[in-house]
Image (tube, grey):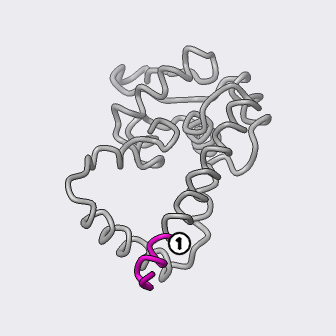
Amino acid sequence: MNPNALAAREALRQFRVIFGAVRQHFQAVEKACGVSGAQIWAMAALRQTPGMKVSELAQTLSIHASTASNLLDKIEKSGLIRRERNSVDQRVVRLYLTDAGEKALGKAPQPLTGILTHALGQLPDEALSRLNQDLATLIAHMGEVNTQYAQKPLSEL
């Protein structure tokens, strides 16, 4: 077998390990607190910065604003967050955790941002830059791909 084929198999194996670990973490989050990993990450961001706007939360989670809004709708229906309109400008909506949201976060396994996001944040800048370049090259070799997936939480893919 040629060395390139062996290296490709090893890379595929490592992707499987990563995806399996991410899926396992999402399942643990859901089992522990009844909400998705993306919802926990959003709630953790609101704990850290109470009163965020939807656009700010979307930027923090690296997702599209409409995706963030849909995510928040689900969390709000569960009573874990609340939206408050600014008395001066009714168009401005601020987001806050409820007591139930705080309790759900307390039950969630760490890291609240998800294990992949946390692990990527631990990489040195040089390694992260190299990884981004290599992944861009890999995506280019895949042919036609839907880049809109880049704006969705992993738990929703």
Instruction: Please name whichever residue, 75 or 83, is drawn nearer the observer in this view of the structure.
Output: 75
- The residue shown at (25%, 51%) is 145
Looking at the figure, which quarter contains the N terminus? Answer: bottom left
Q: Which residues are magenta?
A: 1-9
What type of secondary structure mainly makes up the magenta span?
helix
Q: Quadrant of residue 29?
A: top right
Q: Is residue 110 above or below residue 3?
A: above
Residue 8 coordinates in the image, percent (x, y): 44, 73
Residue 7 coordinates in the image, percent (x, y): 47, 78
Under mark 1, the amino acid is Glu
Instruction: Please name whichever residue, 145 or 77, is drawn nearer the observer in this view of the structure.
Output: 145
- The residue shown at (40%, 81%) is 4
Judge whether residue 6 is colored magenta: yes
Residue 104 coordinates in the image, percent (x, y): 73, 29
35 lies left or right of 128? right
Residue 2 coordinates in the image, percent (x, y): 42, 84
Q: Which residue is mark 1?
A: 10
- The residue shown at (25%, 65%) is 140
Looking at the figure, which quarter contains the C terminus? Answer: top left
Q: Residue furthest front?
A: 1
